[in-house]
Image: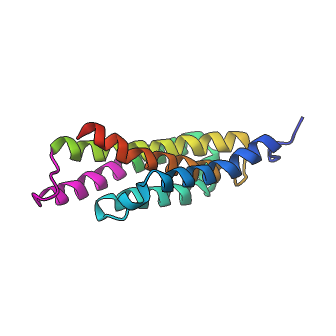
Amino acid sequence: MTSPTRITPAAAVVGLVAPVVSAWLFWREGAWDTYRTPLFWPFFFAAGLMASFSTSPMAADTRPWRSLVTRAALAAAAAAAAAAALAARNPITGLHARDIAALGILAAALVAAAGFATELGERVGPGTWMKTAWCVAACLLTMAAIPRLLLLVH
């Protein structure tokens, strides 16, 4: 039986490979170019905050962690929707109410995915870097999918 702070080799491989593969997909799918526009900056800020929060000891305790993720998801949704509403004031952008709502929902989904991945990483390797690696991978994978999902809505 392994100690609770010992990481299995399989979990370590997943923790190291998942962010690299996610970053490659993010780059290959062209999402990097999409996120250079100010409309998508709230997603970067939300991902950065979640990666930072994943390093905190709060991620080890399920109740406060889920509460934090819920509040962060609501804040990210509000920030992304507000940015989209500001951008929609310019008719060149062609943003409509459904686009604004979709951006808010996708920002909340990004934070929820990061929170869920952090919780899973904490279960696999309690008190280790695993939770942050899984959080970063979830953020990158979600961000790579967001432009395609927005195309489905629009």
Q: Is residue 20 left or right of residue 142?
A: right
Image coordinates of residue 64 in percent, x first then y, are 53, 45
Q: Is residue 109 left or right of residue 98?
A: right
Seen in the picture, residue 43 relative to 106 is either above or below; the reply is: below
Q: Quadrant of the C terminus?
A: top left
Residue at the extreme right of the image, as rendered: 1
The one nearer the camera, 37 or 48, is 37
Image coordinates of residue 108 in percent, x first then y, are 38, 44
Q: Is residue 14 left or right of residue 33?
A: right
Q: Locate residue 51: give its quadrant.
A: bottom right
Seen in the picture, residue 82 relative to 112 is either above or below; the reply is: below
Q: Which residues are magenta?
A: 74-96
Q: Main secondary structure of the magenta part?
A: helix
The one nearer the camera, 65 or 29, is 29
Is 49 a magenta residue?
no
Residue at the extreme top of the image, as rendered: 1
Image coordinates of residue 35 in percent, x first then y, are 38, 60
Is 88 a magenta residue?
yes
Residue 105 appears anywhere in the view: no
Rendered residue at 36%/43% (across/down)? 148
Rendered residue at 49%/56% (across/down)? 27
Rendered residue at 32%/48% (across/down)? 77
